[in-house]
Every structure is written in structure tokens, then in C-alpha cells.
């Protein structure tokens, strides 16, 4: 959890971004990477047929990704 003394609010473009120091970042990063690979395995590649590159994107994926 982020303590109050390690927390700032920064304004970037029209989006508010909260910045703070986290504990156990290596463990958190591993969990996030696992979650990304899990989502990628469950979500088909949304690359449009007109694109001539080899990448993975959710560009034209279903709107349920935002839920």
C-alpha cells in the first residue's frame, strides 16, 4: 500500500496520474506480467487485415475489454 507521505498527484495532459512508492514491486511486476499474458491468451489478436505487420493488438477487439 502507498503511504500518504509517498504520494503525489501530477497533472499530465487531461489525465490525473497518482504517483507513489510501492513495496514489493518485483512481486507486483510478476503478477502484472502474468495477468497480461493471461489476458492475451484469452483475447484474440485484433489486428486489422489491412495492416502489414506482425504484432499483437486489441485495436479492433470487443468492447468487453474495458469492463
Image (tube, helix red, strand yellow):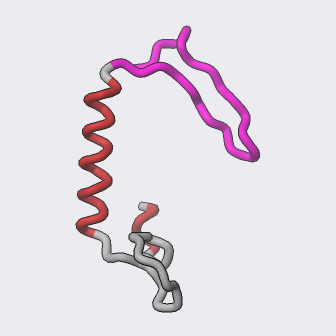
| Residue furthest front in the image | 53
| Residue furthest top in the image | 5
Residue at 59% from the left image edge and 30% from the top image edge: 18
Q: Nearer the viewer, residue 42 or 51?
A: 51
Quarter where residue 13 is shown: top right
* Residue 46 pos. (x, y %): 42, 78
Relative to residue 40, is residue 13 depicted above or below?
A: above
Q: What span is in magenta?
A: 1-23
**For residue 61, side relative to residue 12 (left or right):** left
Quarter the N terminus occupies: top left
Residue at 52% from the left image edge and 90% from the top image edge: 50
Residue at 44% from the left image edge and 80% from the top image edge: 47
Relative to residue 8, is residue 45 depicted above or below?
A: below
**For residue 36, side relative to residue 6 (left or right):** left
Residue at 39% from the left image edge and 70% from the top image edge: 56
Q: Nearer the viewer, residue 46 or 64?
A: 46
Quarter where residue 58 is shown: bottom left
Relative to residue 14, is residue 22 depicted above or below?
A: above
**For residue 6, side relative to residue 34 (left or right):** right
Label count reads: 0
* Residue 41 pos. (x, y %): 24, 66
Quarter the C terminus occupies: bottom left
Q: Nearer the viewer, residue 47 or 3?
A: 47
* Residue 3 pos. (x, y %): 47, 13
* Residue 42 pos. (x, y %): 25, 68
> Is residue 9 on the magenta stretch?
yes
Amino acid at each position: 500500500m502507498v503511504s500518504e507521505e509517498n504520494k503525489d498527484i501530477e497533472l499530465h495532459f487531461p489525465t490525473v496520474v497518482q504517483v507513489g512508492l510501492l513495496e514489493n514491486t518485483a512481486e507486483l511486476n510478476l503478477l502484472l506480467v502474468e495477468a497480461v499474458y493471461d489476458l492475451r491468451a484469452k483475447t484474440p489478436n485484433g489486428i486489422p487485415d489491412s495492416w502489414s505487420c506482425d504484432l499483437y493488438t486489441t485495436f479492433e477487439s470487443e468492447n468487453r475489454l474495458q469492463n
